[in-house]
């Protein structure tokens, strides 16, 4: 809702305790909805930003702001928030990333994403959220395509469909952009998922009743983690309602260059496109698309958040390092578009680098750490250097490189770490410990 109502509330002199904030002012009105915010109409971009700033201000140890590194093609900044107990610590918790509005005219996708953030923050002390926030992190970017949202258009200001611009399996279709990753908005999500251990990723859309997972093309064949996708996907669909179903995106309709395809094949985090829509024949309003849809969305997000925290759904690196040491894991590998006609006339894929990196600070005086990460084994992708090779069933054995560093960045030890899904790898960092204080 918005500032308008907040202004009215202020003008009415509602200077009661706790009514100093826009969200509290909204909550005090008779028009309050059942949504966590109490809103009764769509936010503007200023509302989103004010609401995120308010959550940060009022819960400084629980919520921290994220500024995505690239401005939109119109020069606007994209904002998000990170939510966890002791949110500023680099403590190695697994991460659930959820984003809205790849398509700027799908307003309910931003609202549902933002309402979940408000819900988790305002109800952080309730047992179901408290235990999750102790074990995992939630990262929320409600409006990833800010220019499109402001213009109420599906595409970005450069007329590119963000969800056709991801480099993996990219083809030069009319809305795919001039090149893979050509759009700053797309590169923002690449950064978001490459710089933390996002073990679950949900990108919210409208207007179908479906939970989609990779692949996005039939020729690619089922992914190596199809059973895990079906399990969580089906459970999320059940929360949304009896007419929702879960299926691979290729069987909904085929596309290229989508977020979930790149996300899964780069990180092995489970990546979903959740599409919500009212039942057929029901008018599409704020009430039906946001207020009525939220309860189902909340249930789906709770399942995704729980799956994020479940050690069976990621990997763990544990060990002992000097208190104060910085540990970093990284890997670099090439990924490929599909083959298409290059400027020199040859038909071949474009290679692009993928670098995953994240860090942990050892804070416990004992030096013990436990780091929830994505498995080091990477699913062999269907799009390769020599073209499409579908129906892959294997994984690359591709260790994380773990470095143990002084806070000034001096690397004291390098260790390759192979760790499978649901497994724990214990690393020996005695060399780092010996040299740390010198
Ligand atoms: Zn969409």
Image (tube, rainbow, N blue to C red):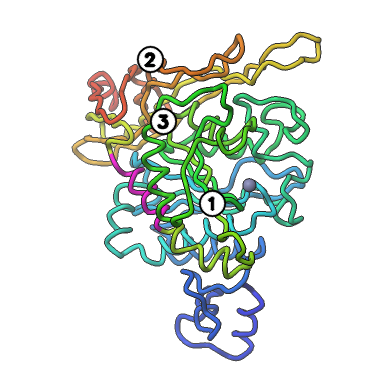
Label 3 C-beta lies within 8 Å of the nearest ligand 1 atom: no
Q: Is residue 436 left or right of residue 220?
A: left
Q: Which mark is residue 32?
A: none
Looking at the rendering, the stretch of residues picked out in magenta corresponds to 299-310
Name the residue at 56% across, 32% down.
250
Q: What percent of the width, then of the height, locates residue 336?
A: 60, 19
CA gap between label 2 and label 3 equals 19 Å
Mark 1, Cα crowd under 10 Å, few <14 / some 14-19 / many 20+, is many
Question: What SS does tag 2 mark?
Answer: loop
Question: What SS does tag 3 mark?
Answer: helix
CA gap between label 3 and label 1 equals 20 Å
Q: Is residue 4 left or right of residue 73?
A: left
Mark 3, Cα crowd under 10 Å, few <14 / some 14-19 / many 20+, is some
Indicate which disc, 1 or 2, sits on the residue closer to the N terminus.
Answer: 1
Q: Main secondary structure of the magenta part?
A: helix
Name the residue at 33% across, 58% down.
129
Q: What percent of the width, then of the height, locates residue 123?
A: 37, 66
Asked if the stretch drawn in magenta spans residue 264, the answer is no
Q: Which mark is residue 209?
A: 1
Name the residue at 61% across, 13% down.
387
Residue highlighted by disc 2: 397
Name the residue at 75% across, 32% down.
177
Q: Which mark is residue 226?
A: 3
Seen from this angle, which residue lies furthest front? 281
Mark 2, Cα crowd under 10 Å, few <14 / some 14-19 / many 20+, is some
Indicate which disc, 3 or 1, sits on the residue closer to the N terminus.
Answer: 1
Q: State which quadrant residue 166 falls in.
A: top right
Q: Nearer the viewer, mark 2 or mark 3?
A: 3
Q: Which of these two is toward me, 298 or 219?
A: 219
* Total numbered labels placed on residues in the image: 3
Q: Is residue 257 above or below residue 365?
A: above
């Amino acid at each position: 809702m918005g500032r308008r109502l907040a202004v009215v509330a202020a003008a009415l002199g509602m200077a009661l305790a706790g009514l100093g904030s826009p969200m509290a002012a909204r909550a005090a009105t008779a028009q309050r909805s059942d949504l966590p915010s109490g809103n009764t109409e769509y936010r503007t971009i200023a509302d989103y930003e004010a609401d995120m700033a308010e959550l940060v201000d009022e819960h400084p140890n629980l919520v921290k702001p994220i500024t995505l590194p690239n401005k939109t093609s119109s020069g606007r900044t994209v904002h998000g928030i990170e939510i966890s107990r002791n949110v500023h610590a680099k403590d190695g918790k697994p991460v659930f990333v959820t984003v809205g509005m790849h398509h700027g005219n799908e307003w309910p996708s931003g609202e549902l994403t933002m309402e979940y953030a408000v819900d988790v923050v305002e109800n952080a002390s309730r047992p179901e959220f408290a235990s999750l926030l102790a074990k995992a992190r939630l990262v929320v970017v409600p409006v990833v395509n800010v220019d499109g949202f402001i213009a109420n258009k599906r595409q970005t200001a450069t007329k590119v469909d963000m969800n056709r611009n991801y480099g993996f399996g990219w083809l030069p279709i009319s809305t795919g952009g001039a090149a893979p990753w050509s759009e700053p908005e797309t590169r923002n999500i690449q950064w978001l998922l490459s710089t933390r251990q996002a073990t679950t990723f949900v990108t919210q859309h409208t207007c179908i009743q479906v939970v989609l997972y990779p692949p996005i093309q039939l020729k690619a064949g089922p992914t190596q983690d199809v059973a895990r996708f079906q399990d969580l996907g089906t459970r999320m669909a059940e929360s949304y309602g009896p007419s929702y179903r879960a299926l691979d995106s290729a069987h909904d309709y085929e596309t290229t260059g989508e977020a979930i395809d790149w996300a899964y094949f780069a990180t092995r985090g489970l990546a979903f496109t959740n599409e919500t829509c009212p039942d057929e024949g029901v008018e599409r309003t704020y009430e039906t698309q946001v207020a009525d849809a939220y309860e189902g969305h909340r249930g789906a997000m709770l399942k995704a958040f729980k799956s994020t925290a479940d050690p069976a759904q990621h990997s763990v690196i544990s060990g002992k390092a000097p208190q104060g040491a910085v540990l970093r894991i990284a890997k670099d590998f090439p990924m490929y578009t599909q083959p298409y006609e290059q400027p020199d006339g040859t038909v071949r894929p474009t290679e692009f680098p993928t670098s995953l990196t994240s860090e942990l600070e050892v804070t416990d005086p004992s030096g013990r750490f436990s780091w929830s990460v994505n498995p080091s084994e990477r699913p062999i992708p269907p799009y390769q250097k020599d073209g499409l090779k579908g129906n892959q069933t294997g994984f690359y054995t591709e260790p994380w490189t773990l470095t143990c560093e002084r806070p000034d960045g001096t690397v004291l030890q390098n260790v390759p770490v192979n760790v499978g899904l649901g497994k724990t790898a214990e690393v020996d960092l005695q060399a780092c410990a010996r040299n740390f204080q010198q």
